Amino acid sequence: MTKKTTDIVAYITWIGWIVAFFAGTKQESKFHLNQALVIWLSYIVLGILAYIPIVGIVAGILSLVMFVFWIMGLVSACQGNEKELPLIGSIKILK
């Protein structure tokens, strides 16, 4: 896959992230692979927290914020930019 395709596929579900990680150009697309991984892991944590009664309300609001970040990351990947997302863009999981 090309760099742009790898970047875009990384944002399309967590299965797309796995495909992009193993079939894509890892070194060139490390930025978007990392950002998409942070978004998907955040969704998992927020999904678990949603079951706690009062914390679930905050988790629901944060899920909407993560959805906006997901759209921002996808648009950035489609345009070929490497712009960090607000608040979570500085988190580096992949080295």
Image: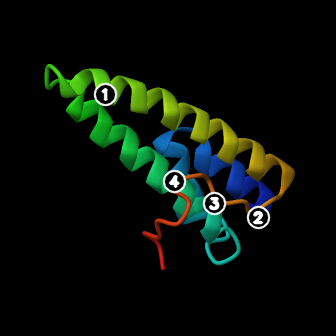
Q: Residue furthest right?
A: 79
Q: Are marks 3 and 2 in contact (CB under 8 Å)?
A: no
Q: Position of residue 11 (x, y in %)?
A: 60, 45
- Specify whether 79 is left or right of 93: right
Q: Which residue is mark 2?
A: 3
Q: Are marks 4 and 2 in contact (CB under 8 Å)?
A: no
- Specify whether 80 is left or right of 24: right
User: Residue at image x 46%, y 65%?
Assistant: 91
Q: Which residue is mark 1?
A: 58
Label 4: how many residues lie within 10 Å, few (<14), some (14-19) or many (20+)? few
Q: Amino acid at mark 4?
A: Leu
Q: Position of residue 32 (x, y in %)?
A: 63, 60
Q: Residue furthest left?
A: 52
| Badge nearest the viewer, 4 or 3 | 4
User: Residue at image x 67%, y 68%?
Assistant: 29
Name the quadrant containing residue 27.
bottom right
Q: How is the image coloured?
A: rainbow
Q: Which residue is mark 3?
A: 32
Q: Position of residue 74 (x, y in %)?
A: 69, 43
Spatial distance from mark 3 to mark 2, Cα to Cα? 10 Å
The dot on residue 87 is 4
